[in-house]
Amino acid sequence: MASMRISRVISSLIFLLLTACAFTQGAELTPIPTPSPVILPQGTPVPTRAREMHPIETPDQTITPTEAAATLLCDPTAGNAIPEYIVRAELNYAKRALQVAQEITYTNVSNKPLNTLVLNVKPNAQAGIFSLQSLNFIDGQSVEYKLAGQRLEIPLPEALEPDCSLEFNLTFNLRLPPIDVGGIHAYQGYLGYSDRQTNLGQWLPVVAVKQGDIWISHDETPIGEQELLDIANWKLNFRITDAPDTLRIAAPGTVEKVSDSEWNLSLSNVRDYSLSIGENYRLLQQATTSNVSVEIYTFDDAIISSNTGSMDTAAYALNTAVKSLSLYESLYGAYPLQRLVMVQGDFPDGMEFSGIVFVGGEYFRGLSGVESYLTLISVHEIAHQWWYSQVGNDQAIHPWLDEALATYSEFVFIEKFYPTLTDWWWDFRVNRLLPQGFVDSTVYEFTTRRAYINAIYLRGVLMLHDLRKDLGDDVFFGWLNRYAATGTGQVMSPDGFWSLLTPEQLERTLATRERYLKQPQIITLATPVCLEATCTP
Ligand SMILES: [Zn+2]
């Protein structure tokens, strides 16, 4: 809700006393559904563009309020309240199937009453994965909803006033897909499984971001990412059944092992809670000088043979990760978490999540010196801890805001630690591909991944490098540092990014902007945070 987190007129006490939120009567976490959940009349909500109302019954097994409400109904100090997700999940490992109960607490931090709430259900973007079992307000009131693709729209029975909270429960099943090796969905292997790895990337429904009067849900496409995520607090109880005893869990935040098959997981102020489960994961660990624990989970095939014997590419990636994290802390500001988890992914390329990143196994197996994708993709994904995880952006509409900065951070790393390889980096990563295209394009403007990367990432880094020349190193890196500080916990727009320059500095960058952008003219924002009224001009 960063876009909505605008200064609000604090409601008067009298108003508060008169305002009732019927939704937050409180209860404890919904229990895990029974192994044979009641099949509700709406059937399996496979993605469909047709939107129909689906009245839903209150199933007996889902609501057992046993504790008094701990949540206030309407609280004038709730101004910065972020969504809270409390999850109980059980993974049947043999079937790669999950039963999930998710409790969502949402506070209206805008200054207008809300009549609708929208969740984005990323796993429902593909057919056959997500199956909603029940959706209820915490007091047992049934919820009507429309589910179409990722968008789950909930008309509220009465308006949710500013500062008021709403709690509701979902239960759903996930049937994970096998990683689509070589197929169109291969890059989405962060939600899927191989014979030795199960990945849960962005597997939980989240409240959408509201910009103006519009709840943002973007259509899924195989190119790039389409998420626009707010920060939230996450608490999970995670159990695994029917599994070999070689499983190891790679998860960010606080990980408390309750038993051999049960964990309590938590992480606050982050955009997603993603994790990976692997058979026989090897764990290597190293602390940065700022005391961040960097952990890498890999398989045995990350140990490769070289001319001088065997080489553990995981150790190389870990060392690279530690160096890059320290460098980015010095340039962009502190890494806010105590741990950073890296995982060797059984899917191509890399993928960033909050506190956890995947780097494709092919890059480990293909390591041949610093001049390898393992170096670049590792530091790229780590840079996303600033450009994505801390500073949010609309990844579908303004993908360059995180991708160009993450890719330029590769160059910054090479420049710092391997200055003789800067020419190699420009040639290998950028120039040999003869990139074309406008940097400020949306993901929907491309039909191939190559064209998308060339325009957004590669022309993006060329633009950033030219901006650095326009402004000088001090101003340029000071700008990125201010952008990180201003945007932390927020969703930033390009106008917010540019508005952190002075009018004179902006003037100096005009010719560069005209070379790379479809819309080189910017709207200078008085406050360079993407506010409700200014996010989408
Ligand atoms: Zn990236």
Image (cartoon, helix red, strand yellow):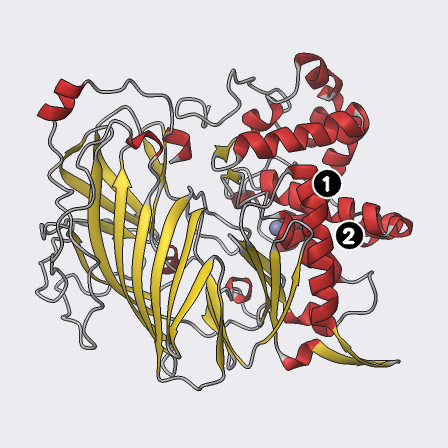
Q: Nearer the viewer, residue 50 or 175?
A: 175
Q: Residue 191: image x %, image y %?
A: 46, 65
Q: Which residue is mark 1?
A: 461
Cα distance, mark 2 to mark 1? 10 Å
**Res. 345 in view:** yes
- Locate residue 444 relative to residue 126 in the image: left or right: right
Label 2 near ligand 1 (CB < 8 Å):
no
Name the residue at the right extreme. Answer: 420
Callout 2 secondary element:
helix
Three-letter code, disc 2: Arg
Tell me where residue 404 appears, x and y as whole percent: 66, 42
Query: In the rendered image of this protein, does residue 41 appear above or below residue 281?
Result: above
Task: Indicate the quadrant where residue 469 lies.
Answer: top right
| Residue for point 48% across, 47% down | 226
Q: Is 60 situated left or right of 509 in this image?
A: left
Q: Which residue is mark 2?
A: 429
Q: Which mark is residue 223?
A: none
Residue 201 visible in the snapshot: no
465 versus 125 height, above or below: above
- Please report the residue visible at 13 percent of the width from the left and 35 percent of the height from the top: 21
The residue nearer to you, when weighing 379 against 331, is: 331
- Mark 2 or mark 1: which comes first in sequence? 2
Q: Quadrant of residue 40?
A: bottom left
Three-letter code for the amino acid on which mark 1 is drawn: Val
Quarter holding the N terminus is top left
Single out the residue that lies furthest toward the top.
Answer: 504
Coordinates of residue 366 in the picture (x, y in percent) = 75, 72
Q: Do the CB atoms of the residues marked 2 and 1 lie less than 8 Å apart? A: yes
Residue at image position (24%, 30%) is 163
Under circle 1, the secondary element is helix
